[in-house]
Image (cartoon, rainbow, N blue to C red):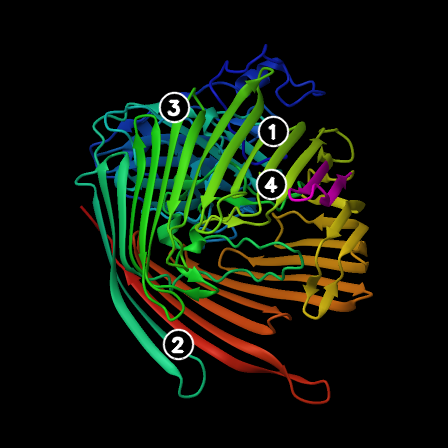
């Protein structure tokens, strides 16, 4: 499927007569198979009184006597048919936990793939199980849990019926075992780790099994090609969840953190302090989160980027406090990352972007106190955030506030509002406020997806009283066989949300595009995608075109082997750019004002992720601004399962322009080792030739038990400098060692 997320409204809303072919036309799928794939599912959760030992064996008597949830249905490659391998799923619960036991039968158990054990590892190359729990049964939001045959713990949050935050961590447990019949998994998910409405006995539930060597996906509910797994509206339901409680609903997580930083000889300093994270459930569906003396020393380093565009780069949030319930603060879809093959608009408009808090020009700002209230009140999603930052030489302490509300309407849609106050760097009265609307359905023309978004935002800053708004609409038809998209957006020149992110201003965006993805049964093809997308930016102050691009993709072949040929000397983009002022594209290389037209061609091959050695290579060439350029991007991974993963990646641009030639280089490598799913060591090495900085971060995470963690993080930087005779050396620049221990008390 082209898009990985979609929102939908109540069955019947915007609906026409059902179609016999939910795959998007041109397929002769049997109606009875399609009916099985679209079947709404329901299952009973069995209450247990005896103790369950979470060891992956499923050897307690109750696992054999309790009813299973019923068979799964094949989504790919043969939609609606029975799976090639049997999967037995049983659901149990007691006073404290929901237990999910899975026996994944396999006729060739020696070929089961499980290459990783690291916490929150990407499991796309492995056999795996994925679970979504829609505890509110609102068909929009869910908790996500996943594992593979090696027992990796992966979790995340699903929101807006398809978007996800995979950096969220919960306290839960899973154990797996390989057997002569396949592999088994035993999940224990504490009710204290979930939010849910009091008294509700029915939850939304779905489970998917992926058999990687066969490129097969089996699902319990919603097994249609145009239905993504995180499309919560298509989940089934589980019943009989009576008497659930969260106890007092209080989690206390004290921590001790220390740092040692050296900037050279005789310039070392050590600091340390205790801190506290607190989580309290006022109700089972409304949670207060507080943090004091917050430390982010365990956070992973950002991936290096060299910006060769005129617009700001967006780095993802990785800090735990801000990732908790981050979906509540999401706004419209103005910064959703598209699927590979769909070009981004590069016009992000984010009224609240948490990286603006606690980070200033690359320097960490102390976070003295943070308080967050998130959850549901009836049909309303609520998010309130207050933060007090500490003093730095460059900025005084600040009080910052964010409020977000979404009123769920119809069945899958919402109308929302957002408000922010405060400035992270200046003591001024800066505010941002706006509203957004989302309407969607998965029943358009029978069972197709259709999505409409609209928003309007204004930023109020001293000295700027006009041209300080942004607004727009987007209409999408994201389905497996056909994809359509139209977007229109204005971003005025004084629109500057102090706690948000805007990639470009003073522009009007127009985007229109379409793709077709037939599944011909020739050349061992799984799917063939053809796409065309046109994007234009017009200046609001003078009405002139600032840029436009036509992205064409006539060859995007996905093979049954798992290998992909995304492009073969295809016209990547036909581009027009108008510079109204000089643009320094690279240090010392300045492009003069004027008009530029250029066309680039691209070849991109990706080998199947199921293999131990997996590679993704993209090469583009052609005209580039006033000259020409070659761009080479590679990503090569070698796995020695399940403990060791080696990765090397490059991003190289070789440009030859009349104004000057340059080579932009980003090199990276990772060595990740896991002794078990609870002890892991990751090493990240990066270099770029603009900063001339070589950086190494080594990170150890030891999960003593779920909720109790010990981190060690070491970072070393070197600067590349010339010496003589065109020789260079790397001089040690800074060293940093961080340690953090946190322990969770659950009351």
Looking at the picture, does residue 575 appear above or below residue 510? below
Residue 318 at least partly seen:
no
Q: Secondary structure at mark 3?
A: strand
Per the image, the residue denoted by label 1 is: 476
Nearest to N terminus: mark 1 or mark 4: 4
Mark 3 and mark 1: Cα distance apart in space = 28 Å
**Dot in front, 1 or 4:** 1
Residue 90: image x %, image y %? 36, 30
Q: Which residue is mark 4?
A: 338
Which mark lies nearer to you, 3 or 2? 2
Give the quarter of the image for residue 300: bottom left
Which residue is painted at 61% across and 38% down in the image?
A: 215
Q: Position of residue 258 (x, y in %)?
A: 31, 70
Tell whether label 1 touches label 2 (CB within 8 Å).
no
How far apart, in angstroms, are the residues tagged by discs 2 and 1?
A: 49 Å
Q: Quadrant of the N terminus?
A: top right
Q: Main secondary structure of the magenta part?
A: strand
Mark 2 or mark 1, which has the lower sequence index? 2
Q: Which residue position is annotated with label 3?
A: 237
Secondary element type, mark 4: loop
Q: Is residue 548 magenta?
A: yes
Which of the 4 image quadrants contains residue 367?
bottom left
The answer to whether residue 513 shows anywhere in this view is: yes
**Marking on residue 261:** 2
Q: Position of residue 46 (x, y in %)?
A: 28, 27
Residue 741 lies left or right of residue 592; in this view the side is left
N-term mark: 3 or 4: 3
Point out the stretch of residues depicted in magenta.
533-553
User: In the figure, is residue 599 to the left or right of 509?
Assistant: right
């Amino acid at each position: 499927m082209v898009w990985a997320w979609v929102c939908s409204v109540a069955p019947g809303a915007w609906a026409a007569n059902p179609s016999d072919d939910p795959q998007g036309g041109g397929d002769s799928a049997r109606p009875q198979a399609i009916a099985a794939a679209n079947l709404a599912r329901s299952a009973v959760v069995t209450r247990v009184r005896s103790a369950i030992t979470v060891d992956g064996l499923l050897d307690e008597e109750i696992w054999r006597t309790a009813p299973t949830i019923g068979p799964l249905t094949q989504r790919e490659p043969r939609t609606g048919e029975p799976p090639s391998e049997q999967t037995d799923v049983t659901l149990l619960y007691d006073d404290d936990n929901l237990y999910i036991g899975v026996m994944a039968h396999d006729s060739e158990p020696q070929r089961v793939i499980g290459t990783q054990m690291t916490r929150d590892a990407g499991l796309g190359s492995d056999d795996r199980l994925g679970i979504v729990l829609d505890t509110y049964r609102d068909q929009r939001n869910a908790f996500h849990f996943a594992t593979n045959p090696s027992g990796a713990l992966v979790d995340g949050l699903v929101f807006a019926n398809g978007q996800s935050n995979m950096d969220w961590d919960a306290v839960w447990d899973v154990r797996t075992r390989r057997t002569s019949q396949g592999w088994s998994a035993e999940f224990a998910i504490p009710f204290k780790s979930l939010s849910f409405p009091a008294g509700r006995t029915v939850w939304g539930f779905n489970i998917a099994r992926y058999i990687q060597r066969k490129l097969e996906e089996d699902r319990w509910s919603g097994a249609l090609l145009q239905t993504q797994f995180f499309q919560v509206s298509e989940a089934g339901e589980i019943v009989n969840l009576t008497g659930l409680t969260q106890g007092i609903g209080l989690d206390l997580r004290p921590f001790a953190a220390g740092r040692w930083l050296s900037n050279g000889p005789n310039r070392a300093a050590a600091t340390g302090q205790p801190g506290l994270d607190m989580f309290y459930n006022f109700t089972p569906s409304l949670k207060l989160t507080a943090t004091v003396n917050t430390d982010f020393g365990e956070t992973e380093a950002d991936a290096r980027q060299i910006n060769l565009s005129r617009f700001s780069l967006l780095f993802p949030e990785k800090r735990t406090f801000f990732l908790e319930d981050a979906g509540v603060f999401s706004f419209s879809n103005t910064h959703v990352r598209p699927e590979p093959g769909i070009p981004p608009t590069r016009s992000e408009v984010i009224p609240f972007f948490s990286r603006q808090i606690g980070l200033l020009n690359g320097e960490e700002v102390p976070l003295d106190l943070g308080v967050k209230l998130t959850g549901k009140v009836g049909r309303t999603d609520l998010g309130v955030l207050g933060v007090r930052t500490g003093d730095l030489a460059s900025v005084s302490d600040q009080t910052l506030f964010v409020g977000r509300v979404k009123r769920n309407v119809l069945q899958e849609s919402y109308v929302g509002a957002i408000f922010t106050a405060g400035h992270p760097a200046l003591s001024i009265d800066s505010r941002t406020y706006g509203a957004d609307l989302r309407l969607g359905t998965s029943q358009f023309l029978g069972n197709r997806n259709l999505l409409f978004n609209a928003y309007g935002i204004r930023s109020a800053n001293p000295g700027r009283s006009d041209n300080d708004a942004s607004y727009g609409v987007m209409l999408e038809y994201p389905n497996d066989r056909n994809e359509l998209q139209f977007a229109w957006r204005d971003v005025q020149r004084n629109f500057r949300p102090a706690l948000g992110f805007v990639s470009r201003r003073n522009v009007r965006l127009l985007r229109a595009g379409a793709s077709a993805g037939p599944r011909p049964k020739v050349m061992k093809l799984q799917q063939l995608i053809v796409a065309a997308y046109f994007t234009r930016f017009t200046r609001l102050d003078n009405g002139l075109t600032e840029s436009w691009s036509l992205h064409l993709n006539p060859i995007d072949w996905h093979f049954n082997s798992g290998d992909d040929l995304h492009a073969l000397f295809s016209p990547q983009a036909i581009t027009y750019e108008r510079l109204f002022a000089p643009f320094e594209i690279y240090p010392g290389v300045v492009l003069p004002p004027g008009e530029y037209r250029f066309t680039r061609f691209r070849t991109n091959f990706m080998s199947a992720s199921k293999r131990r050695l997996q590679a993704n290579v993209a090469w583009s060439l052609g005209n580039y601004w006033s000259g020409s350029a070659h761009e080479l991007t590679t990503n090569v991974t070698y796995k020695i399962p399940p403990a060791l993963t080696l990765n090397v990646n490059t991003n190289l641009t070789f440009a030859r322009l009349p104004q000057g030639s340059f080579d932009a280089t980003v090199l990276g490598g990772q060595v990740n080792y896991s002794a078990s799913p609870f002890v892991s060591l990751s090493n990240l090495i990066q270099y770029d030739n603009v900063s001339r900085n070589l950086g190494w971060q080594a990170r150890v995470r030891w999960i003593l038990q779920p909720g109790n963690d010990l981190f060690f993080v070491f970072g070393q930087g070197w600067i590349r400098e010339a010496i003589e005779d065109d020789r260079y050396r790397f001089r040690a620049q800074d060293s940093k060692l961080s340690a953090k221990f946190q322990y969770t008390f659950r009351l």
